[in-house]
Image (cartoon, coloured by chain):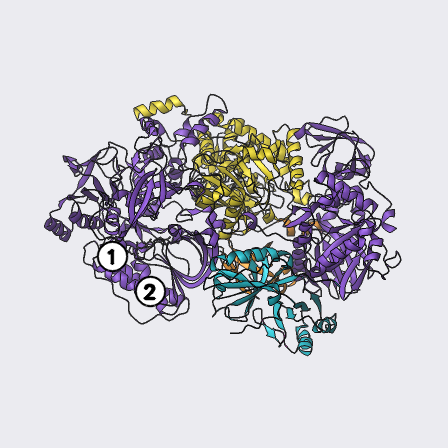
Chain colours: A orange, B yellow, C purple, D cyan
């Protein structure tokens, strides 16, 4: 079973977390009037076979949204940080482009 | 084609004469009119219909492993056409109609078993939702019956009707023509039929890149060298993003794991396909006797093709909640497939922004039942270089356009929620 | 009590002082404590114990362990019956009842055996080639017959009376398998101070040593090891515990069976326990199993694995025959020959190899055992049981002779149980010198030892185990113990050496006659493999699926490697290039009920109860599921059926005052200096300028610009709001708000906290609602000016803080009262008591829904992420001049005259009814296709005295007043109706403001 | 005026302790107050000063270690979020009033959480039926706590003694968790502490 190391709570089975999807993209700033920007952000995915930056929320624990790097080819979980420390819009963070 | 029949079977049994190969072991030629990437149900069906419906015989299917290695060979084999959203309804019914003639068409028994699918409802709101679906089906000439609890009980006496049931059964929607198909036979049957029409099926040949310039795609790089082709179609199921990425396309697709499960073989027990209404869970019994069941995707992107244990527990819980007697049966094996998930749960069958490159992907849970219609429509789309009318709703740019929703169950725009 | 004819005097591990009665197909039999069903049956002289799947050939036990493909029984009676139990793994208990399967009328005389006559027709893939005609649906007829013939045992409808549990465990080192390697590993790891778990599927520790004579050296070593291990505090030994799967992240799933001790479910004793173990390090010590030899009629009862014959003899004191032929391609089977000889009449060895190790030859000679080398099997005599074998020498099949025998002990070599090491996706590797596949590698922190890795000698297995134990302990940060290991008895027998001598033969030459079985359970023969190859199904995965090889309950433990060898031969490739099929969990089949554990029946999924739940139950509420909640559907005071009761409850609300439990609404406390800004961003409408003490209805969109959730939010203070959400959306909304705050706008100083559980909520609705409040809380001012519609105030009643918001879902004068949950029942009762003179009563969900439909309020079935604001007629709510979540794509969201949007619908045909899920058409147009819309919510309105509905219709209110058709073909109904405003009642809202 | 009903009121049927030697006791702890106090990003120091002033205890540094005063426990439940558990008296108002709005916020959760306990030598084994945490005493020492999942519901598990644990569960799930708990302890033999006896000031068990 996948385990995620929550920076606050420690290592827990992934079932304590809620998946939040791709975190590699920068969220367009509030009010960005370009629909294309929102389209790309919401609907297009790199979907890599390899390291994947993704959100998980420790919703059965400290309720923090985490930014996790996980290898989709092996499911091995790498670095985990609090999403709020990833920089505005979570565009940066571990394994960032 | 060397036709299969009972009398042939007898003659072979008596004479011990060897059977011919079902399909040739083709070596890549240098050039094809159409090259299809992916020897799953979709790729093979497309090749077959290109040859059968459009008279194209310089067609190749290149498959990285062996045909049927992907999801066509590992799915829970449900076929049905109980779709409600415009576009889906027509497409899946067309597919079911093709299934109904497929064994004869291919001269290969794909064992379509129209034993009926029953979707259960556990609340009045769910009953209404099923009614809406069933009404749409009937209005589109598709068979559907709304069942009250008593009728469900008559058909499925082994469900939990006790006071202990956490989610009591209120009723259900039955599609009598729905059922199962022997999954591997679909790949083999299409392969054999396509091969007999001259299609090259090239196994052990992974596409690693595209030959492309400003005028579009001209062929592919493979582990076995370059192959030129006037038109190239992608039909690689869970790997759509990866292969399209080789051509520089980014898709509205994420790859997720879906697990499937089979119990030890038992005498006939579950004689329908049943879908639980409390959670995504569905079950049927294979002709060998195993109860085949599945649930939701594991829930996070992955290419590992193996599942996580919590999901195993979760489906086991559903199994016992639905059919208490299953508690004493043994799980024999569980496996996973890699499946494209899209923001609306709907697929893509279309041309792409790159000329001569066609895409078929994003099938989520529903690609197996779509196989004949995908083959038919994608073949037409390739042959005419224009989307077949039945797949116009499956365009790649629909999110950019804000087109009508294909979201059958209203799960919103997150691929991993569908 | 007489021992069965097969029982010998060898010591064994059975307890002859504890005889046990059991039955097979109703026949009373006896065995001993320590027997398995298989050994007890063999002791009784049983030969045919089942029929094969396809050809219904008589079958006997092939092995003595988890790998046996043949001996499947239905064990137990009534609702405790378990189909397809492996006789070799069922430990005998007093009164055990077993029934044979897949034979009719009996295993001795089985009519299904006629299938054998059609055998040539039933070869690999036959069903793909026929059963297609004459009509398109013909298969359905054939299928019925095929399904009936297929399947092994039968399932039952009754619920399972037994109890199962799941649990979690943590350890430093987990050792799987307690053979010599596992024992060594556990000792080494535990001595280092690490926490160690040792899991063994058998009831006894020792693995293959258990098949050694109990009088030998190895038994001395085994008992000493066991004693030493038991003395270690940090070691937990789990017997009857199978590791069934290794999953990502070092998770191993163990299944502990307690079937043999008949646990009492009423006392909470579980029959089986599934443990999810997180181990920092893992040692695979699963050993190896022997494989059969493939030759014509190799499935005749009496032909079994040499290791099995030896185990039956040494462990269970059963000789499976009196005259044995040992047929082998390697040294290990000689052990069976030597051990059997003293207990039976004759033993002969037929060795397919040209040369036999001199010491083996010498030992055989000294015992008077004939050894024939270069042996081939030209035929097998006997049908229901083996009566002899026809042996030849060399390829030329010269000098055929038949040897009378009733037992053939065969050995085709050993196959390591690499299954678990492959579950994580690592493919096994072919080891030529062992003619076997071994683990191709290990995940970090995983180690392998013993026969699994090809260490086929006892000292090396123990050594490797010890080593692995050290490595695993070190991996977890422990310093390996310096202390030495109980050294294992040094190799005495020639087979117990590191130079494993084997001549791989995947198919014995010579035998053309008879069916040569590769997969015994699924009746797959060499012939089937040849056909599959000819037809092009030669890749291993195709082979498996075309012939069903290895897909039985044994998952091909005895057959896969032989099939691989034969297919590689046909294709002219080496085994190292052939690969294997994929090993998948579980290692052995697991009860579905064990996996579900206690999550069954009522415990299947969490149930949420409001703090008023018990009151409702005690006062005649009929409850209904609403997501995880149970809510009052209607109350018996109002009627015996929902159809009657909700009308009465509605009447109460429309004419007097009712009380309903709305505690299930999601409630979120929003606080902080930026709370106003935050809400402005998440709602389409504005909240920043909402005055303190006021509530406002708000709608949230998702990023995609479609409906996400709705609810009212009240401003309690400058920097504090009280948000409510839909019952269903509560969790989603909270997570979404947290997502935005933590990822998108971490600069906003806002805290959101779920307070759904903190507050009990009750709606007080009806024209007398104010009176009710005044009676309940005398002395407080609830007048219009102090508490207008959409107003809010905090009350403190007897030191209890309460929150009163004037909101209406029903369309009547109404209030929502929130009180701390623990006081909910008291306040609720107080409200009812003080409201009694007004006729105040509780009302349920059905009435709540009907009331809101009359008022045209949207709810669950309309809050649909496929819909836009405009679709729901909420377009004007949005303040597009400010940024909010979803604004950009909402603006683009599908719209236009053809887009379906919210309307009211009233039935025009008295006596007919509208139904949820009906499809809408314009009057006169053909009723087919997808229609122009559909009904989302419907009710009989006692106020309007007709069926009314809300729904979506193309063009929406542009068609106000037009006649339409509501089609419900599922019931053959078409009803004329009219488009109306969705607000059926009091469109000006006068009732709200009284 | 209004009687308080705990989530399990009426469900704590006393049950004779079973003869099993390992018998467990389970019950509900009532009569406590729980206040959530939270700081904004850079104000934890300030919040800590306020809490120290009011309670005489400081905020724990990390999730898992408790802060305490003679009457209070403080759990860290988020990066800047804390639960203060104590008797139902004046400290609540002092803290509610004492945290300036620019610094942070307070929310009462006294009614939203139900506090259960399990006590006895087999408590760890019983909890392992549903809690995926390593409760080995060297890993999860007395007074340690964790936020975790129990049967699909969030719980705060606090080890209050060698063999005693408390579970803070959501009130609306309390009956569900209680049903789970009484089922999990079944194989070990158990008794239910009567409602009154469990109404203690808190967790005094320290072995
Ligand atoms: C567990 C599970 C259960 C399912 N149950 C159902 C169901 O009940 N009903 C239903 O309708 N649908 C179901 N589906 C979905 C359905 O199986 C798929 O949508 C469908 O099979 C996909 O089409 P395909 O058959 O062409 O895919 P596949 O069989 O996966 O074919 C794709 C092929 O492309 C090959 N490929 C990939 N990359 C390359 C490359 N670079 N070069 C060459 N070849 C490549 C792959 O090896 C593979 O063989 C299920 C899916 C799963 C995983
Ligand atoms: N002479 C030969 O050719 C030959 C060949 C093979 C083995 N051997 C002998 O076998 C022994 C090897 O010792 P070993 O310890 O490696 O193997 P072993 O077979 O003695 O022990 C393996 C143990 O693991 C258990 N096991 C297997 N899978 C399991 C699972 N999934 N869960 C729980 N338990 C499981 C088995 O029940 C068995 O007790 C040596 O004594 C060696 O001499 C000899
Ligand atoms: C409908 C269906 C029925 C199956 N029945 C069995 C079965 O009876 N026995 C078995 O071993 N595997 C069965 N399988 C699973 C396959 O063995 C295999 O696991 C699956 O095709 C995925 O391939 P893989 O495990 O090689 O990756 C079945 C698969 C499907 C799709
Ligand atoms: Zn956490």
Cβ of mark 2 under 8 Å from ligand 2: the answer is: no
In depth, the one of C876 and B265 nearer the eye is: B265
In depth, the one of B293 and B316 nearer the eye is: B316
- Does label 1 lie on the same chain as label 2? yes
Residue B22: x and y in percent read 40, 31
Q: Distance of mark 2 from mark 1, alpha carbons?
A: 22 Å
Question: Is residue C700 magenta-colored?
Answer: no
**Judging from the image, what secondary structure is the residue with disc 2 in?**
helix
For the point 47% across and 26% down, which residue is it? C139
Can residue C470 be seen here? The reply is: no
Q: Which mark is on residue C229?
A: 2
In the displayed structure image, the side of residue C213 where residue B357 appears, left or right = right
Q: Mark 2 lies on which chain?
A: C
Q: Mark 1 points at which residue?
A: C457
In terms of sequence position, does the residue under pointer 2 or pointer 1 come before the other? 2
Q: Which chain carries label 1?
A: C
Residue B290: x and y in percent read 44, 39
Residue D45: x and y in percent read 66, 75
Q: In which quarter of the image is residue D47?
A: bottom right
**Residue D163, relative to residue B84: is it above or below?**
below
The residues colored magenta run D56-62
Cβ of mark 1 under 8 Å from ligand 2: the answer is: yes
Disc 1 crowd, CA 10 A, few/some/many (<14, 14-19, 20+) = many
In the displayed structure image, the side of residue C636 where residue A44 appears, left or right = left
């Amino acid at each position: 079973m996948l385990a995620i190391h929550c920076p606050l709570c420690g290592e827990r089975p992934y079932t304590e977390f809620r998946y939040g999807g791709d975190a590699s993209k920068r969220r367009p700033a509030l009010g960005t009037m370009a629909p294309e920007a929102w389209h790309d952000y919401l609907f297009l995915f790199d979907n890599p076979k390899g390291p994947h930056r993704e959100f998980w929320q420790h919703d059965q624990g400290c309720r923090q949204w985490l930014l996790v790097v996980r290898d989709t080819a092996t499911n091995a979980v790498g670095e985990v940080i609090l999403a709020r420390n990833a920089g505005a819009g979570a565009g940066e963070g571990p394994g960032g482009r | 084609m060397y036709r299969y029949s009972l009398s042939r079977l007898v003659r072979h049994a008596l004479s011990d004469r060897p059977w011919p190969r079902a399909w040739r072991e083709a070596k890549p030629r240098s050039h094809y009119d159409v090259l299809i990437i992916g020897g799953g149900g979709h790729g093979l069906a497309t090749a077959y219909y290109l040859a059968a419906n459009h008279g194209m015989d310089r067609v190749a299917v290149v498959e990285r492993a062996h045909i049927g290695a992907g999801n066509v060979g590992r799915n829970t084999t449900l076929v049905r056409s109980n779709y409600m959203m415009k576009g889906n309804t027509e497409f899946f019914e067309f597919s079911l109609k093709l299934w109904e003639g497929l064994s004869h068409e291919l001269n290969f028994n794909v064992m379509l078993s129209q034993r009926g699918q029953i979707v259960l409802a556990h609340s009045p709101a769910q009953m209404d939702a099923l009614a809406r679906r069933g009404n749409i089906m009937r209005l589109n000439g598709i068979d559907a019956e709304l069942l009250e609890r008593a009728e469900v009980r008559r058909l499925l006496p082994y469900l939990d009707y006790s006071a202990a049931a956490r989610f009591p059964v209120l009723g259900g929607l039955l599609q009598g023509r729905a059922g199962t198909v022997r999954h591997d036979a679909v790949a083999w049957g299409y392969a054999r039929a396509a091969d007999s029409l001259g299609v090259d099926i090239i196994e052990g040949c992974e596409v690693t890149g595209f030959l492309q310039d400003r005028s579009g795609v001209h062929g592919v790089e493979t582990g076995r060298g370059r192959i030129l082709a006037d038109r190239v179609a992608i039909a690689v199921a869970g790997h759509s993003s990866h292969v399209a990425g080789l051509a520089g396309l980014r898709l509205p697709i994420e790859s997720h794991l879906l697990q499937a499960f089979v119990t030890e073989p038992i005498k006939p027990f579950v004689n329908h396909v049943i879908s639980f209404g409390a959670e995504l869970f569905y079950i049927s019994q294979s002709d060998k006797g195993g109860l085949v069941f599945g649930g939701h995707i594991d829930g996070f992107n992955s290419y590992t093709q193996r599942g996580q244990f919590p999901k195993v527990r979760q489906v086991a819980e559903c199994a016992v909640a639905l059919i208490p007697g299953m508690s004493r049966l043994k799980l024999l094996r569980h496996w996973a497939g890699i499946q494209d998930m899209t923001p609306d749960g709907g697929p893509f069958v279309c041309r792409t922004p790159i000329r001569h490159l066609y895409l078929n992907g994003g099938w989520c849970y529903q690609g197996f039942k779509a196989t004949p219609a995908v083959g038919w429509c994608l073949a037409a789309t390739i042959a005419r270089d224009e989307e077949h009318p039945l797949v116009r709703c499956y365009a790649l740019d629909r999110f950019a356009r804000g087109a009508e929703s294909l979201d059958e169950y209203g799960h919103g725009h997150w691929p991993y929620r569908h | 009590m007489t021992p069965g004819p097969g029982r010998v005097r060898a010591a064994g591990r059975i307890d002859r002082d504890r005889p046990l009665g059991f039955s097979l197909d109703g026949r009373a039999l006896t065995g001993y404590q320590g027997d398995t069903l298989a050994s007890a049956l063999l002791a009784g002289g049983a030969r045919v114990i089942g029929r094969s799947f396809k050809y219904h050939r008589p079958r006997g036990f092939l092995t003595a362990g988890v790998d046996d493909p043949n001996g499947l029984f239905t064990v137990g009676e009534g609702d405790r019956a378990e189909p397809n139990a492996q006789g070799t793994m069922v430990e005998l208990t007093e009164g055990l009842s077993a029934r044979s399967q897949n034979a009719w009328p009996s295993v001795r005389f089985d009519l299904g055996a006629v299938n054998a006559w059609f055998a040539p027709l039933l070869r690999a893939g036959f069903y793909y080639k026929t059963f297609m005609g004459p009509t398109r649906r013909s298969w359905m007829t054939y299928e019925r017959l095929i399904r009936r013939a297929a399947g092994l045992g039968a399932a039952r409808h009754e619920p399972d009376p037994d109890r199962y549990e799941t649990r979690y465990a943590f350890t430093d080192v987990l050792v799987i398998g307690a053979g010599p390697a596992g024992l060594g590993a556990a000792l080494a790891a535990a001595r280092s101070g690490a926490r160690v778990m040792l899991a063994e599927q058998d009831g006894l520790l020792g693995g293959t040593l258990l098949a050694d004579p109990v009088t030998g050296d190895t038994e001395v070593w085994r008992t000493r090891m066991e004693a030493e291990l038991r003395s270690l505090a940090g070691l937990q030994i789990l017997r009857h515990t199978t590791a069934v799967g290794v999953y990502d992240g070092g998770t191993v799933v163990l299944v502990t069976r307690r079937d043999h001790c008949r646990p009492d479910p009423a006392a909470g004793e579980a029959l089986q326990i599934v443990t999810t173990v997180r181990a920092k390090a893992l040692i695979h010590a699963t050993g190896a199993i022997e494989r059969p030899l493939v030759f014509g009629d190799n499935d005749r009862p009496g032909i079994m694995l040499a290791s099995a014959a030896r185990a039956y003899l040494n462990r269970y004191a059963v000789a499976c025959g009196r005259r044995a032929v040992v047929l082998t391609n390697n040294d290990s089977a000689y052990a069976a020959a030597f051990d059997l000889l003293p207990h039976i009449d004759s033993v002969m060895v037929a060795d397919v190899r040209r040369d036999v190790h001199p010491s083996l030859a010498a030992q055989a000679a000294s015992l008077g055992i004939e050894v024939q080398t270069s042996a081939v099997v030209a035929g097998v005599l006997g049908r229901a049981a083996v009566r002899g074998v026809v042996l030849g020498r060399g390829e030329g099949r010269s000098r055929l002779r038949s040897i009378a025998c009733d037992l053939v002990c065969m050995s085709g070599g050993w196959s390591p149980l690499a299954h678990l090491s492959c579950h994580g996706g690592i493919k096994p590797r072919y080891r030529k010198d062992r003619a076997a596949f071994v683990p191709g590698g290990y995940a970090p922190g995983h180690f392998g030892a013993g026969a699994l890795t090809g260490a086929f000698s006892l000292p090396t297995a123990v050594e490797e185990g010890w080593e692995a134990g050290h490595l695993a302990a070190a991996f977890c940060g422990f310093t390996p113990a310096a202390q030495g290991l109980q050294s294992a008895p040094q190799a005495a027998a020639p087979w117990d050496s590191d130079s494993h001598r084997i001549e791989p033969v995947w198919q014995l030459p010579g035998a053309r006659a008879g069916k040569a079985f590769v997969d015994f359970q699924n009746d797959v023969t060499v012939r089937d493999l040849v056909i599959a190859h000819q037809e092009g199904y030669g890749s291993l995965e195709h082979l498996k699926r075309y012939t069903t090889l290895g897909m039985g309950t044994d998952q091909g433990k005895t057959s896969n490697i032989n099939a691989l060898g034969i297919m590689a031969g046909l294709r002219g490739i080496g085994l190292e290039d052939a690969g294997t099929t994929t090993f998948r969990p579980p290692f052995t089949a697991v009860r579905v009920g064990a996996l579900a554990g206690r999550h069954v029946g009522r415990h299947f999924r969490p149930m949420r109860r409001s703090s008023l739940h018990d009151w409702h139950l005690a006062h005649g509420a009929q409850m209904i599921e609403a997501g995880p909640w149970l809510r009052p559907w209607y109350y018996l005071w109002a009627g015996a059926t929902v159809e009657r009761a909700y009308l009465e409850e509605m009447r109460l609300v429309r004419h007097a005052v009712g009380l309903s439990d709305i505690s299930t609404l999601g409630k979120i406390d929003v606080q902080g200096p930026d709370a106003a800004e935050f809400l402005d961003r998440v709602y389409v409408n504005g909240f920043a300028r909402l005055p303190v003490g006021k509530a406002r209805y708000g709608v949230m969109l998702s990023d995609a610009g479609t409906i996400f959730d709705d609810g009212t939010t009240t401003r309690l203070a400058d920097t504090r709001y009280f948000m409510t959400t839909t019952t269903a959306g509560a969790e989603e909304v909270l997570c979404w708000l947290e997502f935005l705050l933590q990822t998108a706008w971490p600069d906003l100083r806002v805290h959101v906290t779920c307070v759904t559980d903190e507050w009990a909520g009750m709606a007080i609705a009806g024209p007398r609602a104010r009176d009710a409040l005044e009676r309940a809380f005398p002395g407080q001012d609830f007048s219009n000016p102090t508490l207008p519609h959409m107003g809010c105030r905090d009350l403190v009643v007897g030191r209890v803080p309460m929150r009163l918001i004037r909101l209406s879902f029903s369309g009547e004068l109404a209030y929502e009262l929130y009180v701390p949950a623990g006081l909910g029942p008291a306040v609720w009762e107080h409200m009812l008591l003080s409201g009694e003179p007004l006729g105040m009563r509780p009302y349920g969900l059905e009435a709540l829904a009907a009331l809101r439909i009359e008022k045209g309020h949207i709810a669950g079935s309309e809050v649909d992420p496929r819909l836009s604001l405009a679709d729901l007629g909420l377009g004007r709510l949005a303040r597009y001049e400010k940024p909010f979540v979803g604004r950009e794509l909402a603006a683009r969201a599908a719209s236009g005259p053809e887009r379906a949007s919210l309307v009211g619908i009233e039935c025009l045909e008295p006596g007919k009814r509208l139904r949820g899920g009906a499809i809408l058409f314009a009057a006169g147009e053909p009723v087919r296709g997808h229609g122009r819309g559909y009904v989302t919510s419907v009710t009989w309105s006692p106020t309007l005295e007709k069926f009314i509905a809300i729904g979506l219709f193309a063009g929406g209110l542009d068609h106000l007043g037009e006649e339409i058709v509501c089609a419900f073909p599922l019931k053959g109904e078409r009803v004329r109706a009219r488009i109306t405003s969705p607000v059926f009642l009091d469109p000006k809202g006068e009732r709200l403001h009284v | 005026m209004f009687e308080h009903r705990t989530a399990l009121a009426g469900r704590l049927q006393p049950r004779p302790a079973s003869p099993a030697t390992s018998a467990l006791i389970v019950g509900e702890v009532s009569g406590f107050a729980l206040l959530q106090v939270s700081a904004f990003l850079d104000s934890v120091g300030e919040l800590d000063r306020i809490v120290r002033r009011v309670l005489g205890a400081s905020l724990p540094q990390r999730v898992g270690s408790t802060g305490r005063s003679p009457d209070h426990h403080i759990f860290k439940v988020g990066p800047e979020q804390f639960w203060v558990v104590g008797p139902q008296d004046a400290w609540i108002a002092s803290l509610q009033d004492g945290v300036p709005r620019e610094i942070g916020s307070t929310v009462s959760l006294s009614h939203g959480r139900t506090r259960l306990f399990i006590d006895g030598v087999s408590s760890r084994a019983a909890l392992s039926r549903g809690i995926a945490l390593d409760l080995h005493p060297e890993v999860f020492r007395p007074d340690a706590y964790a936020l975790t999942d129990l049967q699909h519901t969030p719980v705060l598990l606090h080890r209050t003694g060698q063999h005693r644990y408390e579970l803070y569960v959501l009130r609306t799930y309390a009956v569900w968790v209680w049903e789970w708990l009484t089922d999990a302890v079944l194989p070990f033999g158990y008794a239910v502490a009567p409602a009154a006896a469990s109404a203690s000031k808190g967790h005094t068990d320290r072995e």
